[in-house]
Amino acid sequence: MKIGLKILPRKEVLDSQGRTVQNSLNENGFRVSHCTIGKYIVLDVDAQNINEAREKIQKMAEFILYNPLIETYEIENQTYG
Amino acid sequence: MKIGLKILPRKEVLDSQGRTVQNSLNENGFRVSHCTIGKYIVLDVDAQNINEAREKIQKMAEFILYNPLIETYEIENQTYG
Amino acid sequence: MKKVGIVRFLGTNCDKDVALAVESVGGHAQYLWYQDQFDVKEYEAIVLPGGFSYGDYLRTGALAAIAPIMKSVWEANQKGIPILGICNGFQILCEAKMLPGVLMRNQKQRFIDELEELQIESTKSVWISNYQSKQKIKIPIAHGEGRYYAEEDDLKALQDQDLIVATYLDNPNGSVYDIAGIMNTQKNIVALMPHPERAMSDWMGSQDGRGFFQWL
Amino acid sequence: MAIRKPNSEKLKKYRLNEQEYGEICKLLKREPNDIEWALFSALWSEHCSYKSSKIHLKKFYNKNPRVLISEGENSGIIDLGQDEKISFKMESHNHPSFIEPYQGAATGVGGILRDIFTMGARPIMLANYLCFGEMGATKMKSLVQGVVSGISSYGNCVGVPTVTGATELHSSYDKNILVNALALGVFYPGDPIALSKAQGGKNLVVYVGAKTGRDGIHGASMASQSFDENSESSRPTVQIGDPFFEKLLIESCLEVICQNLVVAIQDMGAAGLTSSSFEMSSKGGVGLKLHLDQVPLRDSTLTPEDILLSESQERMLLICDPQKLKAIQNVFQKWSLDATVIGEVTETKDVELYWRGDLLTKINPDILVENAPRYERPFKEKKSQNLGLINFNIFSLQETLEDILKSDQGTSRKWIYQQYDQRVGGQTARNCDHTIGVVCLEHSKRALGLALGCRPYLMRMDTRIGALDSVFYPALNLSVKGFTPLAVTDCLNFGSPENPETMGDFVASVESMSEACRLLDTPVISGNVSFYNQTLDQDITPTPATGVVGIRENIKNIPEDFILKENLGIYLVYHHELTTGGALEELYKKSIHANKLKMDTNRVANWIQKIQNVSNHESVLGSKTVGKFGFLTTLIKMTTEVGVVIEKLPDFIKSQDDLFLERLYEVLYIVRNEKTFEEELYKNEIQFVRLGYSKKDTFEIFNNKLEKLDFKKLKEIYKESFNL
Ligand SMILES: Nc1ncnc2c1ncn2[C@@H]1O[C@H](COP(=O)(O)OP(=O)(O)O)[C@@H](O)[C@H]1O
Ligand SMILES: [Mg+2]
């Protein structure tokens, strides 16, 4: 079962990548008032149902995939793709 | 209006990071049959409705945010957060 | 004395190194600022040096590829002015679609600094006219994203038209066909991941990089 | 004056003790208000005030005619002649790196770079001194990976080459790793020196760089505390770095300094805006009026206290003439950075802090900076024992060498330094593959060398010997390449100063290092102290890391580290003071022994100077100082496809064991024209023995019988064993 995991920089933390991309977009004539850049990870795990899959992914997220010091994460509520 | 944009590697050969993470998850006792790593970008744009916002974001994606040679993208259908 | 324009983006960090290399062979180096456009007629060559333009954010080279100065670089290319891209410069030229393909994260997922042995594959551009085909040279690499990748047809074109500039003897990063550098079909653009400006005299450990600049 | 006893929770929160509180009240002539509590907490912390170390640091030999600055500024400066000057310094980021290795190490590099370019010097070299626990210890591999990629991502991106380093592994660092970063910058002719003294009433206080966020609040006082089981939960105070921003700051700050647009400049390091502003004010003897609400924020919920203590990275404070503000802003804007006025210099002597129009405090900065406590803490020097060497009864040379070269202590660190850009800048002549780092000075074309010191196993053997060695050994490493050692920086990593034995080690180290520096005439021009490196009362090995800088007139023909040709003479040149089996004993899990624990420091210093002469002799093609496992191991590391035939072992080698002992000090030379080389040695009255000659594809020893080593396998083991 494939589920998506979104990992974003915590709001209080410096997101220099987002800021730089935002500037660059604006310089090129787009209008963006905020840009945050994180990761999107799709994990394929063995599970009977979505809840079981999400639980597994939560464990992995907590174990290694995200850094609580600088990031927050969100596991999607439906299967991916 | 904040909308999320997912960018993922186009094929497996282009995702060495995904495989590395998958291996390290499996080495640590998790069971993952596949792992794909991409980006998640949240953009805040001025728009009347979701469609307008998505159109704007599509333009940015095509202009710079993704590289069609190696990536695909998907703009979310609801506002973020 | 040939006048060489060296492009500086925010985050470029090999600009001075290239200027010194250019000057050591008697060229005249002038910096060009990323926000400006320049008069292409004034320059006999343009170099996009290495570094971390825009902090390597989004994708390496991507944000530099849309900076204002790239309009002039594009124009210079149209006029056939020799352009050299080194490391981040190579990444920028790919992102600007002036060269085929893309440079991805090294296979080992780590940055690698190493003196690498290369084989010159084609000498058809002025930038490499001082080398012999199949000549082996030693030039350092220093990159985290140097794994060259392109679609089948592009690769075939590179091979068929003899546009591969140099290959690694001991592929450090997983590049397809061991590619270290390529040129465009017009042959005025050469780009490579290794840093010839870091191999200009014996005390640097190698002077095999001089050939790239000697024609200046 | 009626002073109430403070509640102990408040003291604990602000990490001050009762006496200190009493002193504060005395100085203020009242009780501190809330904001002042925070200010004292930060500036009177060990980290900012050096309260336990200052009286000892005064003992350092720190002046000679070359020294322009060696105290009171962000970093020291020496004059190299020919209109060139350099500034260099070393700093620790141990605690943050243990909590969040990637960011901790990265911001360590960022911080030390700012100390250098604040002075107006352009950074041209980086180095790092790392101590990790045993690779099997909990989380150690991920700590190493995190630290190395943090250093690499930051240093590479800002474009300053990492040219040398040292990595030590030992169980005493299992729960308290050391991450010390060194940066060196250069002034070429005409480059002004910038200082941090605020001056001139009505001048403006300008804030540049990244916006202030919540990172690192209370970082300074955290670094002044030991680790306990709960350290993991102190995570939210770790700072986040952005090397791209730092690169822009380097360029823009050097530009405003170069154009003489600033009166004073100071980075915001430990304790952020608090320490930078109070130190600028105190040094200049002028007042400052600061409007904290004008500070650019990333997070609008920050309180004045947060703003004062935030350790957000990549921020600087400038003082400038109002007339020059526009010009300054233009420079920063060109580099896509903001410069915001947050206050002004006043004729009073006080720092006044305002928040939305309200005065939060008005306080003389000397009270916080100059009058910070100074402690002469009790200390007790521990006596080393373990005299007399022990027997290993080594049987197989090949097997012993394999054991050594694959061990934590003996293997190559290439996996680490391969991740560092060692040649950006285009001036690197010797990189991390070599004993010392060398860059070419662009103006004079002279060679500038850098070597790091401190070998913890010697510190474990005997504090004074180890501390002497932490200056002598890197100085010798420079000398064997023909460099004149010029000056020293240090980073003193110790346990708790409240423990008299730790303090004893500290005092002994400072005294010994200073003695070595005086004898070599290499003053200590900068440094850093990191105390409280302990976990649950377990101290780390006392680790006084050093960086020694030297110069050589010619960038060309620096003796190689490797044997590149056949039929060259191989010489062992020595001056023996003491012999130890230290590293090998630790490898085989025994304690450390030596034949004596004394050094004639005069003679050592003298010999190091002579070695420098010899090393510049035209017959010398290669050289290397003999390291921790004795000369055979060092010789193996020098081989390429060309190996060695050892025809004659020195008389002092009486058993196979002897081949693996370290004698302080020995040097290996690779020589052509042996006769003139020997004459040079005789002339300098240096002891030596000719071991043999170089030969392709073989490594042979005549040791009663002929023995052949599989040196290519040994080299392979050496290169590949440290691979995470
Ligand atoms: N953390 C590090 N950063 C950069 N270089 C390092 C680091 N650790 C070790 N090195 C490099 O490795 C060399 C030390 O290697 P080592 O195996 O101890 O050999 P030797 O003692 O014979 O010089 C140093 O000279 C240095 O250049
Ligand atoms: Mg400072």
Image: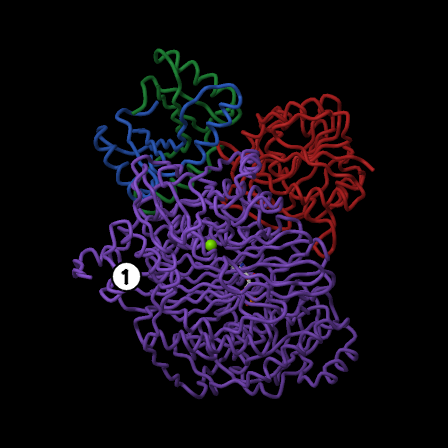
Chain colours: A blue, B green, C red, D purple
Residue B35 x %, y %: 38, 34
Residue D695 x %, y %: 71, 70
Residue D383 relative to residue D245: left or right: left
Determine the residue positioned at 48% across, 71% down: D455
Q: Mark 1 near ligand 2 (CB under 8 Å)?
A: no
Residue D118 relative to residue B73: left or right: right
Three-letter amino acid code of the residue under disc 1? Ile
Q: Is residue A48 visible?
A: yes
Q: Nearer the viewer, residue C65 or D503?
A: D503
Residue C196 sits above or below residue D368 on the image: above
Q: Secondary structure at mark 1?
A: helix
Residue D415 x %, y %: 51, 55
Residue B20 sits above or below residue D46 on the image: above
Determine the residue positioned at 39% across, 44% down: D290
The N terminus of chain D appears in which quarter of the rendering?
Answer: bottom left
* Image quadrant where residue D10 sits: bottom left
Q: Which residue is mark 1?
A: D24
Quadrant in which ligand 1 is drawn: bottom right
Q: Nearer the viewer, residue D570 or D540?
A: D540
Q: Nearer the viewer, residue D694 or A7?
A: A7
Tell which subunit mark 1 falls on.
D
* Image quadrant where residue D713 sits: bottom right
Q: Nearer the viewer, residue D486 or C214?
A: D486
Determine the residue positioned at 24% across, 51% down: D33
Q: Residue furthest right?
A: C1
Q: Residue furthest front?
A: D347
Q: Is residue D142 visible?
A: no
